[in-house]
Amino acid sequence: MRHGRNWIFITLVVLVWTAGWDASSVSGYSEAAVGRADSGQAQSPEVRMQSPVTAEANALKLEQQAETLYGYVTEGNINKARETTDAISRLFVLSSFDGLTSVEGVNALSGAIIDMKAAVAGVSVQQERWETAAARLRLAANSLAHPRQPMWLQYYKLIREDLNDMEQSAAGSDLTGWKTAVSHIEERYDTIRPAIIIARKPEEVNRFDAWLSYAAGLVSGSRPPGREELMNAVSQGREAARVMFGKERDEPALSLPLAPREYGLAGWLGAGFILAALAYTAYRKYRGERSRWQLF
Protein backbone atom coordinates (compact mmCIF):
# COMPACT_ATOMS: atom_id res chain seq x y z
CA MET A 1 0.00 0.00 0.00
CA ARG A 2 2.81 2.27 0.87
CA HIS A 3 4.56 1.31 -2.35
CA GLY A 4 1.46 2.26 -4.34
CA ARG A 5 1.32 5.66 -2.72
CA ASN A 6 4.92 6.29 -3.76
CA TRP A 7 4.08 5.57 -7.39
CA ILE A 8 1.10 7.92 -7.20
CA PHE A 9 3.28 10.67 -5.76
CA ILE A 10 5.96 10.19 -8.43
CA THR A 11 3.33 10.25 -11.17
CA LEU A 12 1.89 13.54 -9.88
CA VAL A 13 5.36 15.13 -9.75
CA VAL A 14 6.05 14.07 -13.34
CA LEU A 15 2.73 15.48 -14.53
CA VAL A 16 3.29 18.80 -12.76
CA TRP A 17 6.82 19.09 -14.20
CA THR A 18 5.61 18.27 -17.71
CA ALA A 19 2.85 20.86 -17.49
CA GLY A 20 5.35 23.46 -16.35
CA TRP A 21 7.67 22.71 -19.26
CA ASP A 22 4.82 22.98 -21.75
CA ALA A 23 3.73 26.29 -20.25
CA SER A 24 7.26 27.67 -20.38
CA SER A 25 7.63 26.43 -23.95
CA VAL A 26 4.39 28.08 -25.01
CA SER A 27 5.34 31.22 -23.13
CA GLY A 28 8.78 31.23 -24.69
CA TYR A 29 7.36 30.67 -28.14
CA SER A 30 4.82 33.42 -27.58
CA GLU A 31 7.49 35.80 -26.40
CA ALA A 32 9.66 34.93 -29.39
CA ALA A 33 6.72 35.47 -31.73
CA VAL A 34 5.90 38.76 -30.08
CA GLY A 35 9.56 39.70 -30.22
CA ARG A 36 9.65 38.95 -33.95
CA ALA A 37 6.45 40.88 -34.46
CA ASP A 38 7.81 43.79 -32.47
CA SER A 39 11.03 43.57 -34.46
CA GLY A 40 9.05 43.63 -37.69
CA GLN A 41 7.05 46.57 -36.48
CA ALA A 42 10.27 48.31 -35.51
CA GLN A 43 11.68 47.82 -39.02
CA SER A 44 8.65 49.03 -40.93
CA PRO A 45 9.10 52.70 -39.91
CA GLU A 46 12.69 52.49 -41.14
CA VAL A 47 11.48 51.20 -44.46
CA ARG A 48 8.95 53.98 -44.60
CA MET A 49 11.63 56.55 -43.78
CA GLN A 50 13.53 55.55 -46.93
CA SER A 51 11.59 57.88 -49.22
CA PRO A 52 11.64 56.92 -52.90
CA VAL A 53 13.67 58.98 -55.36
CA THR A 54 11.53 61.87 -56.53
CA ALA A 55 10.84 62.72 -60.15
CA GLU A 56 12.76 65.97 -59.73
CA ALA A 57 15.83 64.10 -58.51
CA ASN A 58 15.59 61.73 -61.46
CA ALA A 59 15.40 64.68 -63.84
CA LEU A 60 18.44 66.36 -62.28
CA LYS A 61 20.45 63.16 -62.47
CA LEU A 62 19.45 62.68 -66.08
CA GLU A 63 20.48 66.23 -66.90
CA GLN A 64 23.85 65.72 -65.21
CA GLN A 65 24.53 62.61 -67.27
CA ALA A 66 23.40 64.35 -70.47
CA GLU A 67 25.84 67.19 -69.74
CA THR A 68 28.62 64.65 -69.20
CA LEU A 69 27.71 62.90 -72.44
CA TYR A 70 27.79 66.17 -74.37
CA GLY A 71 31.28 66.86 -73.02
CA TYR A 72 32.55 63.43 -74.09
CA VAL A 73 31.06 63.87 -77.56
CA THR A 74 32.62 67.29 -78.13
CA GLU A 75 35.96 65.92 -76.89
CA GLY A 76 35.72 62.95 -79.24
CA ASN A 77 35.86 60.38 -76.43
CA ILE A 78 33.99 57.59 -78.19
CA ASN A 79 34.16 54.90 -75.50
CA LYS A 80 33.03 57.21 -72.69
CA ALA A 81 30.25 58.59 -74.87
CA ARG A 82 28.91 55.10 -75.53
CA GLU A 83 29.12 54.13 -71.86
CA THR A 84 27.31 57.28 -70.78
CA THR A 85 24.63 56.78 -73.40
CA ASP A 86 23.94 53.30 -72.03
CA ALA A 87 23.82 54.70 -68.48
CA ILE A 88 21.30 57.34 -69.56
CA SER A 89 19.16 54.69 -71.21
CA ARG A 90 19.13 52.57 -68.04
CA LEU A 91 18.33 55.58 -65.88
CA PHE A 92 15.41 56.51 -68.12
CA VAL A 93 13.95 53.01 -67.93
CA LEU A 94 14.21 52.85 -64.13
CA SER A 95 12.98 56.39 -63.46
CA SER A 96 9.61 58.06 -63.20
CA PHE A 97 8.94 61.62 -64.32
CA ASP A 98 5.34 61.88 -63.21
CA GLY A 99 4.17 65.46 -62.87
CA LEU A 100 7.09 66.97 -64.77
CA THR A 101 5.82 66.60 -68.33
CA SER A 102 3.09 65.10 -70.45
CA VAL A 103 2.98 61.74 -72.21
CA GLU A 104 4.13 63.54 -75.36
CA GLY A 105 7.05 64.96 -73.41
CA VAL A 106 8.14 61.54 -72.16
CA ASN A 107 7.92 60.19 -75.71
CA ALA A 108 10.01 63.10 -76.99
CA LEU A 109 12.68 62.43 -74.35
CA SER A 110 12.65 58.75 -75.22
CA GLY A 111 13.06 59.62 -78.88
CA ALA A 112 16.07 61.82 -78.13
CA ILE A 113 17.71 58.96 -76.21
CA ILE A 114 17.00 56.51 -79.04
CA ASP A 115 18.51 58.92 -81.59
CA MET A 116 21.65 59.20 -79.45
CA LYS A 117 21.92 55.41 -79.12
CA ALA A 118 21.53 55.03 -82.88
CA ALA A 119 24.25 57.61 -83.49
CA VAL A 120 26.82 55.96 -81.21
CA ALA A 121 25.95 52.48 -82.49
CA GLY A 122 27.23 53.25 -85.97
CA VAL A 123 30.38 51.58 -87.20
CA SER A 124 31.89 54.82 -88.39
CA VAL A 125 32.02 57.94 -86.23
CA GLN A 126 30.02 60.83 -87.69
CA GLN A 127 31.03 63.72 -85.48
CA GLU A 128 28.35 66.13 -86.68
CA ARG A 129 25.59 63.58 -86.14
CA TRP A 130 26.94 62.73 -82.68
CA GLU A 131 27.07 66.38 -81.65
CA THR A 132 23.57 67.11 -82.97
CA ALA A 133 22.08 64.11 -81.15
CA ALA A 134 23.96 64.93 -77.94
CA ALA A 135 22.83 68.57 -78.06
CA ARG A 136 19.22 67.51 -78.63
CA LEU A 137 19.33 65.15 -75.65
CA ARG A 138 21.09 67.71 -73.47
CA LEU A 139 18.44 70.36 -74.16
CA ALA A 140 15.62 67.86 -73.59
CA ALA A 141 17.03 66.77 -70.21
CA ASN A 142 17.58 70.41 -69.23
CA SER A 143 14.00 71.27 -70.17
CA LEU A 144 12.75 68.46 -67.93
CA ALA A 145 14.92 69.49 -64.98
CA HIS A 146 14.44 73.27 -65.30
CA PRO A 147 10.96 73.96 -66.68
CA ARG A 148 10.96 77.60 -65.55
CA GLN A 149 14.12 78.68 -67.35
CA PRO A 150 15.29 76.04 -69.84
CA MET A 151 18.24 76.60 -72.14
CA TRP A 152 16.20 76.19 -75.32
CA LEU A 153 14.64 79.63 -74.77
CA GLN A 154 17.97 81.12 -75.88
CA TYR A 155 17.14 80.02 -79.42
CA TYR A 156 14.42 82.66 -79.68
CA LYS A 157 16.89 85.35 -80.70
CA LEU A 158 18.38 83.12 -83.41
CA ILE A 159 14.99 82.22 -84.86
CA ARG A 160 13.97 85.88 -84.86
CA GLU A 161 17.10 86.67 -86.85
CA ASP A 162 16.18 83.94 -89.32
CA LEU A 163 12.69 85.43 -89.60
CA ASN A 164 14.26 88.81 -90.37
CA ASP A 165 16.26 87.13 -93.14
CA MET A 166 13.03 85.66 -94.47
CA GLU A 167 11.49 89.13 -94.49
CA GLN A 168 14.46 90.55 -96.37
CA SER A 169 14.14 87.77 -98.94
CA ALA A 170 10.40 88.31 -99.23
CA ALA A 171 10.86 92.05 -99.80
CA GLY A 172 13.24 91.39 -102.67
CA SER A 173 11.34 88.35 -103.98
CA ASP A 174 14.53 86.38 -103.37
CA LEU A 175 13.29 82.80 -103.28
CA THR A 176 16.80 81.38 -102.88
CA GLY A 177 17.37 83.52 -99.81
CA TRP A 178 13.96 82.46 -98.52
CA LYS A 179 14.88 78.78 -98.81
CA THR A 180 18.16 79.38 -96.99
CA ALA A 181 16.47 81.21 -94.10
CA VAL A 182 13.78 78.53 -93.76
CA SER A 183 16.48 75.84 -93.78
CA HIS A 184 18.25 77.58 -90.88
CA ILE A 185 15.03 77.64 -88.85
CA GLU A 186 14.42 73.97 -89.60
CA GLU A 187 17.90 73.02 -88.34
CA ARG A 188 17.55 75.00 -85.13
CA TYR A 189 14.03 73.80 -84.51
CA ASP A 190 15.01 70.17 -85.03
CA THR A 191 17.57 70.55 -82.23
CA ILE A 192 15.19 72.06 -79.69
CA ARG A 193 11.91 70.37 -80.65
CA PRO A 194 12.08 67.53 -78.06
CA ALA A 195 12.83 70.10 -75.35
CA ILE A 196 9.87 72.22 -76.49
CA ILE A 197 7.49 69.24 -76.49
CA ILE A 198 8.54 68.52 -72.89
CA ALA A 199 7.72 72.06 -71.78
CA ARG A 200 4.90 73.30 -74.00
CA LYS A 201 1.32 72.38 -74.86
CA PRO A 202 0.82 70.17 -77.93
CA GLU A 203 -1.23 72.81 -79.73
CA GLU A 204 1.59 75.36 -79.46
CA VAL A 205 4.07 72.90 -80.93
CA ASN A 206 1.64 71.85 -83.65
CA ARG A 207 1.05 75.47 -84.62
CA PHE A 208 4.74 76.11 -85.25
CA ASP A 209 5.10 72.75 -87.02
CA ALA A 210 2.29 73.67 -89.39
CA TRP A 211 3.70 77.12 -90.07
CA LEU A 212 7.21 75.81 -90.79
CA SER A 213 5.83 73.22 -93.19
CA TYR A 214 3.79 75.94 -94.91
CA ALA A 215 6.76 78.31 -95.20
CA ALA A 216 8.96 75.59 -96.69
CA GLY A 217 6.26 74.58 -99.16
CA LEU A 218 5.58 78.10 -100.44
CA VAL A 219 8.57 78.07 -102.77
CA SER A 220 8.34 74.43 -103.79
CA GLY A 221 5.16 74.69 -105.80
CA SER A 222 4.77 75.30 -109.50
CA ARG A 223 3.47 78.82 -108.93
CA PRO A 224 5.98 81.25 -107.41
CA PRO A 225 4.51 83.07 -104.39
CA GLY A 226 3.88 86.78 -104.47
CA ARG A 227 5.59 89.29 -102.26
CA GLU A 228 2.61 89.95 -100.04
CA GLU A 229 2.06 86.20 -99.58
CA LEU A 230 5.63 85.80 -98.36
CA MET A 231 5.36 88.79 -96.05
CA ASN A 232 2.17 87.40 -94.53
CA ALA A 233 3.94 84.08 -93.93
CA VAL A 234 6.70 85.90 -92.05
CA SER A 235 4.13 87.66 -89.89
CA GLN A 236 2.46 84.35 -89.06
CA GLY A 237 5.83 82.81 -88.22
CA ARG A 238 6.69 85.60 -85.82
CA GLU A 239 3.42 85.13 -83.96
CA ALA A 240 3.79 81.33 -83.81
CA ALA A 241 7.35 81.67 -82.47
CA ARG A 242 6.29 84.29 -79.91
CA VAL A 243 3.59 82.02 -78.50
CA MET A 244 5.81 78.94 -78.48
CA PHE A 245 8.64 80.73 -76.67
CA GLY A 246 6.22 82.34 -74.21
CA LYS A 247 7.14 85.92 -75.06
CA GLU A 248 4.95 88.96 -74.57
CA ARG A 249 3.43 90.51 -77.65
CA ASP A 250 5.91 92.91 -79.19
CA GLU A 251 5.14 96.53 -79.88
CA PRO A 252 4.16 97.15 -83.50
CA ALA A 253 7.37 97.25 -85.49
CA LEU A 254 7.93 98.89 -88.83
CA SER A 255 8.20 96.33 -91.55
CA LEU A 256 9.91 96.71 -94.87
CA PRO A 257 7.89 99.04 -97.13
CA LEU A 258 5.98 97.59 -100.00
CA ALA A 259 6.58 98.83 -103.52
CA PRO A 260 4.79 102.11 -104.43
CA ARG A 261 1.48 101.67 -106.19
CA GLU A 262 0.93 102.89 -109.73
CA TYR A 263 -2.15 105.14 -109.67
CA GLY A 264 -2.42 105.93 -113.39
CA LEU A 265 -4.05 108.94 -115.04
CA ALA A 266 -7.33 108.66 -113.13
CA GLY A 267 -5.48 108.65 -109.84
CA TRP A 268 -3.50 111.77 -110.70
CA LEU A 269 -6.63 113.59 -111.93
CA GLY A 270 -8.42 112.73 -108.70
CA ALA A 271 -5.51 114.00 -106.66
CA GLY A 272 -5.43 117.23 -108.69
CA PHE A 273 -9.13 117.80 -108.11
CA ILE A 274 -8.70 117.36 -104.35
CA LEU A 275 -5.79 119.77 -104.26
CA ALA A 276 -7.74 122.34 -106.29
CA ALA A 277 -10.73 122.07 -103.95
CA LEU A 278 -8.51 122.54 -100.91
CA ALA A 279 -6.83 125.55 -102.49
CA TYR A 280 -10.19 127.17 -103.36
CA THR A 281 -11.47 126.58 -99.83
CA ALA A 282 -8.36 128.17 -98.36
CA TYR A 283 -8.71 131.18 -100.70
CA ARG A 284 -12.38 131.73 -99.72
CA LYS A 285 -11.47 131.56 -96.06
CA TYR A 286 -8.65 134.06 -96.59
CA ARG A 287 -11.03 136.51 -98.41
CA GLY A 288 -13.61 136.18 -95.68
CA GLU A 289 -11.10 136.89 -92.92
CA ARG A 290 -9.77 139.90 -94.84
CA SER A 291 -13.28 141.36 -95.38
CA ARG A 292 -14.09 141.00 -91.71
CA TRP A 293 -11.02 142.95 -90.66
CA GLN A 294 -11.76 145.74 -93.17
CA LEU A 295 -15.08 146.59 -91.46
CA PHE A 296 -13.25 148.33 -88.57
Image (tube, rainbow, N blue to C red):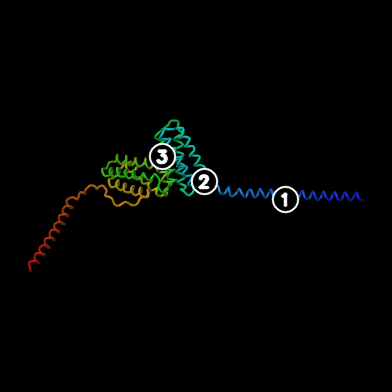
Residue under pointer 1: 27
Q: Nearer the viewer, mark 3 or mark 1?
A: 1
Callout 1 amino acid: Ser
Q: Nearer the viewer, mark 3 or mark 2?
A: 2
Residue under pointer 3: 135
Q: Residue at x 40, y 47 (%)?
A: 149
Secondary structure state at the residue bearing disc 2: loop
Secondary structure state at the residue bearing disc 1: helix
Of the pair 199 and 87, the residue shown nearer to us: 87
Callout 3 amino acid: Ala
Q: Residues within 10 Å of mark 3 (few under 14, many from 20)?
A: many
Residue under pointer 2: 53
Q: Are the residues tagged 3 and 2 within 8 Å (C-beta)?
A: no
Secondary structure state at the residue bearing disc 3: helix
Image position of 107 (left or right of 11): left
Of the pair 3 and 239, the residue shown nearer to us: 3
Q: Residue at x 27, y 45 (%)?
A: 227
